[in-house]
Amino acid sequence: MQYISKLTKFIPYLYFISVIVYWFTIINKLEGISAYPILLFAIPFLWQLIRPSKKLNFSLGIVFVCLSSYLILAYFFNLLNILNWTDTFEKLLLYGGILVVGNFIMSLWMVRNSIKKVF
């Protein structure tokens, strides 16, 4: 059980790496070689798995909390009909809802890990 609790600190990084790989595969099918720069987004998360750093962990957590909060505000504006979205964008908002909530939870988990635990 103690071994499992040691591995739980890596769950947010594995989540973000899997999202980046999924995003890369979708874009790679549509546009080909121009999708490879997307893989650069995975470097900080891979670095955290190899050589954990408390400062990098906190920075990644705060950045993704801010980005996720911005996306959550977009959802609230859509629900309140403050902004008029196109049908395509509303469809994207609908499908990305689970992803936004997952990003927010995982980034809060990263911030919690950097505050609470020593790497």
Image (cartoon, rainbow, N blue to C red):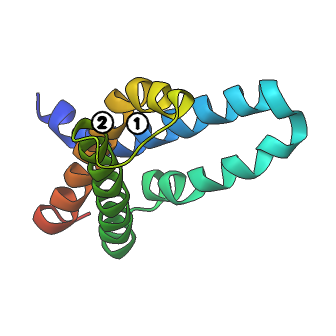
| Element type at mark 1 | helix
Q: Mark 1, residues whose alpha carbon is within 10 Å: few (<14), some, or many (≥20)?
A: some
22 sits to left or right of 14:
right
In the depicted view, which residue is nearer to us: 94 or 84? 84
Residue 52 in view of the camera: yes
Which dot marks residue 57? none
- In this view, which residue lies farthest toward the bottom? 55
Q: Quadrant of the N terminus?
A: top left
Which dot marks residue 102? 2
Q: Quadrant of the C terminus?
A: bottom left
What residue is shown with label 1?
Answer: 15
| Element type at mark 2 | helix
Q: Nearer the viewer, mark 2 or mark 1?
A: 2
What residue is shown at x 45% (from left), y 42% (from top)?
A: 16
In the depicted view, which residue is nearer to us: 105 or 83? 83
Say what amino acid the circle numbered 2 marks: Gly
Marks 2 and 1, how far apart at CA: 9 Å
Where residue 27 sits: x, y (%)? 73, 33
In the depicted view, which residue is nearer to us: 100 or 18? 100
Say what amino acid the circle numbered 1 marks: Tyr
79 is higher (above) or lower (below) than 114: above
Tell me which label, 2 or 1, sits earlier in the chain: 1
Q: Mark 2, residues whose alpha carbon is within 10 Å: few (<14), some, or many (≥20)?
A: some
Residue 9 in view of the camera: no
